[in-house]
Image: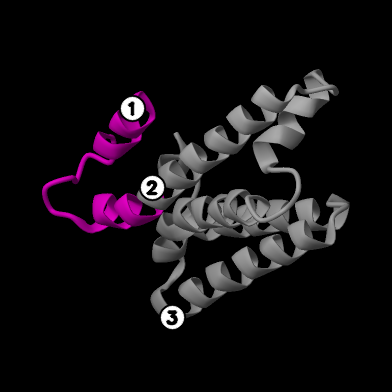
Amino acid sequence: MGALTFDISFILPVLLVLLGLRWLIGGHVNERKILLITVVLLLFVMAGWGQLTGLKFYPVLMNLSFLTVFAGSLFAPMTAVERIARLKEPDLPPEGIAYTRTVTKVWCVFFALTVQLLPVQRYSPVMKSGYCITVLLPTF
């Protein structure tokens, strides 16, 4: 489905509108900054290389945004994973806090790898199928 059913000139603007709506309902100032930077970078890629390339770089920019959020939270008193964990378990023990910090670091490595590997997947003549990295990365 996706690009086979809808024209690319329809899909990318819809994604930009969804990011814009997310920005409007986002509460935290830093979250809004990251979304705004993502949209600006996506528009920059679209203006320079066209909508098809912009659509291909959408996952890269989203992973870069997640990397920014998770890595930035390592310098805050509470990491991103700890915030998520506290939604279910408000009173985390010190071992749980240390564990969530480690999990946040693992997610940072994952996002850094996907930011580097997604462009390789999109433009490598060996990986034309588009499924190699998408299927392999979540398994480790």
Q: Position of residue 12 (x, y in %)?
A: 56, 57
Q: Which segment is the magenta one?
A: 114-140
Mark 2 lies on residue: 114
At mark 3, the secondary structure is helix
Give the quadrant of residue 23.
bottom right
Q: CA distance from mark 3 to mark 1?
A: 35 Å
Rendered residue at 63%/50% (across/down): 74
Check the picture and name the quadrant holding the C terminus: top left
Rendered residue at 40%/54% (across/down): 115
Q: Position of residue 114 (x, y in %)?
A: 38, 47
Q: Are discs 1 and 2 less than 8 Å apart at CB?
A: no
Mark 3 lies on residue: 48
- N-terminal of the pair, mark 3 or mark 2, is 3
Mark 2 is on which residue type?
A: Thr
Nearest to the observer: residue 83 or residue 124? 83
Q: Does the magenta portion include 20?
A: no
Q: Residue furthest left?
A: 126
Label 1: few (<14), some (14–19) or many (≥20) C-alpha neighbours in 10 Å: few
Q: Nearer the viewer, mark 1 or mark 2?
A: 1
